[in-house]
Amino acid sequence: MNWNVMRMKSSSVNYKDEYTGCYFKVFGEPQLVLKHLRGSIAIDVDDNEYIDLLGGIAVNTLGGAHAELADAIAKQARSVIHTSNFFTTTSQIELAKKLISIAEFPAGSRAFLTNSGTESLECALKIVKKYANIVSRPRILTLTNSFHGRTLGALSLTYKNKYRAPFMPLVPNVEFIEAGNVHELESVFSTKSCSEKGEVAALFMEVIQGEAGVVELPADFVLRARQLTREHGALLVVDEVQTGVGRTGSWFAFQNTGTQPDVVTVAKGLAGGFPIGAVIATDQAAEILEPGDHGTTFGGNPLAASAALKVLEVVEHDNLLERARRIYQIVADHYGKTGRKMRGKGALIAVEVQNERSSNVAKLALQFKSAGEEKCKRSVIVNAVNSSWIRIAPALNIDHELLEEGLIRLDVALKEAENEQD
């Protein structure tokens, strides 16, 4: 196929105009209108191809149109698509057991299935709020630069004021402490603080803060958080919505720290793109919510549960935890040659951008420009996670040559954006 001809093709329908005319404006105008995702290649309505280094923001664990995942969903659809929560299905039971197993939680632990990450955080927050009422501990701690979701409860735990301000007041008694600051962490659990403000019911945290720019919490902070919450009878809730399901080279990021939380929230990559979320809780935390305290119509439905089971199976038998670690090494080797800074773990990585040009980089990366290399014919999908960092979170099974091609194309966008004149 002649690439220049293909690039000039134009859809007869202006889908972007149609989108803006019928859809809520919360996302702005879409950057692309996609029709296919095959592995780690995205194809738009004009048949242009893009190397997908974002994976639906850490969602498409197995890439697009994965045959085993598609077959599992189709097979389940021919059996039972939905049943009410008056009943259960074998896939729901099997998934709950599997999640407890890979989290390495103790006997007596339980799981609850939801439809999304923010729903998982809402469930975790209800566990914490009920516990706070039972033990008369009013305070809930979360961290600066955190992101836990957009619904009102999850938003109460999210740091950025831009997201919070239009919807105030939010859940009361939520306090933000500086991420990574052990001294401040110890201070909020001190006798003086607890006597003045009350005891702490729980601490919410992300071991790697994705929306902050893929920032990993210091190990001493995580360990001290677990020690203090345990000593003071507070719950430790770890948000693994973005980092779970092998994204960091382990099933969960907390497993890299030598700690075990009381509650873990999961979503994004769990079913490889099919909407699902989960909450996993140790035995005591799992007993806090009683019949009637919480519920969901679609959470744990057979389609979602079957998709998740298949994703977990493929991650295991295709050794994708190791492949996630290999992705990090490939990116590290690539940027080690150029001196450009990067950070992250496994297949969740941020690449530094000079002159606060990251939004320009992401836009330029989508354009078809020559890199002076024959293999740089496709453009690339990445994300400007903030003004100075580009986030990449590809499928765990991305072809390594394709990853290298995408990095070379990203380099072109980086150089062009950084050399732009104000």
Image (cartoon, rainbow, N blue to C red):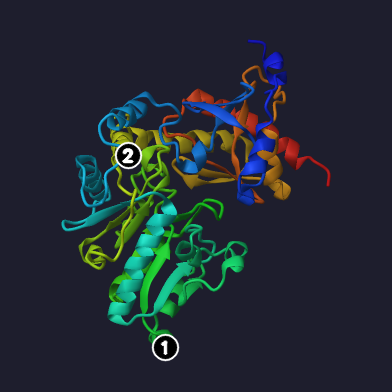
Vertical side of 313 occupied by 155: above or below: below
**Residue 223 appears in the rendering:** no
Question: From the viewer's perspective, is the residue at label 2 or at label 1 nearer?
Answer: 2
Q: Secondary structure at mark 2?
A: helix
Q: Secondary structure at mark 1?
A: helix
Q: Position of residue 234 (x, y in %)?
A: 32, 73
**As drawn, is 406 to the left or to the right of 105?**
right
**Circle 2: residue type:** Ala
Name the mark on residue 308. Answer: 2
Vertical side of 13 occupied by 418: above or below: below
Residue beneath label 1, please? 192
Q: Position of residue 382 (x, y in %)?
A: 59, 38
Name the mark on residue 374. Answer: none
**As drawn, is 37 to the left or to the right of 74?**
right
Instruction: Name the one closer to the observer, 317 or 45.
Output: 45
- Binning the other alpha carbons within 10 Å of mark 1 as few (below 14), some (14 to 19) or many (20 upward) gives few
Between discs 2 and 1, the one toward the N terminus: 1
**Residue 311 appears in the rendering:** yes
Image point 51% across, 61% down: which residue?
A: 146
Q: Quadrant of residue 202?
A: bottom left
**Circle 1: residue type:** Lys
The mark tally for this picture is 2
Vertical side of 182 occupied by 391: above or below: above
Instruction: Name the one closer to the observer, 190 or 194.
Output: 194
Kindly give the residue lying farthest to the top in the view shown.
Answer: 1
Image point 63% across, 10% down: which residue?
A: 1
Q: Quadrant of residue 119?
A: bottom left
Instruction: Name the one closer to the observer, 21 or 44.
Output: 21
Q: Position of residue 169 (x, y in %)?
A: 54, 74
- How many angstroms separate mark 2 from mark 1 (CA)? 46 Å
